[in-house]
Image (cartoon, rainbow, N blue to C red):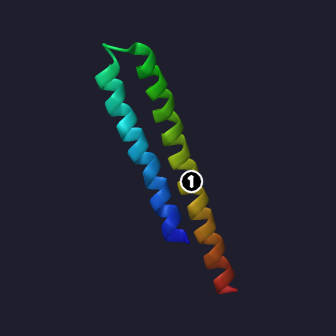
Amino acid sequence: MISILRYTEYLYVLVAGFSVYRIFSDWNTDRSMAYFFIFFAVVSIGMFLFRRNYRKKFEQRKRDNNNK
């Protein structure tokens, strides 16, 4: 279960990387799409940080329950 959570959080990094690529490629041609991908990049980075924090709390809770 925890390994699945680890993979899903890195999917958000991939989405953010793709969004940054599209920001640079679309900036001069279609500024509105570039703003759209800026939004996706920011949300993806935020979701990565949120999911990583959640996974670490879950792992800590599991370790604490196994030690009792």
Tell me: residue 20, above or below residue 9.
above
Tell me: residue 30, above or below residue 63.
above
Q: Residue at x 62, y 63 (%)?
A: 57
Count every numbered label the image shows and give the total. Answer: 1
Estimate the x, y position of residue 16 in percent, counting from the top left: 42, 39
Please state which of residues 68 and 20 is positioned toward the viewer in this rendering: 20
> Going by the image, does 35 lie left or right of 60?
left
Image quadrant holding the C terminus, namely: bottom right
Q: Residue at x 54, y 70 (%)?
A: 2
Tell me which amino acid carries mark 1. Arg
Estimate the x, y position of residue 58 in percent, counting from the top left: 62, 67
Q: Name the secondary structure under disc 1.
A: helix
Tell me: residue 6, above or below residue 17.
below
Q: Quadrant of residue 54?
A: bottom right
Residue position for label 1: 51
Please state which of residues 34 and 48 is positioned toward the viewer in this rendering: 34
Q: Residue at x 57, y 62 (%)?
A: 55
Image quadrant holding the N terminus, namely: bottom right
Q: Tell me if mark 1 has few (under 14), some (14-19) or many (20+) residues whose alpha carbon lies within 10 angstroms of its own.
A: some
Estimate the x, y position of residue 24 in percent, counting from the top left: 31, 24
Estimate the x, y position of residue 35 in percent, counting from the top left: 46, 20
Q: Residue at x 66, y 77 (%)?
A: 64
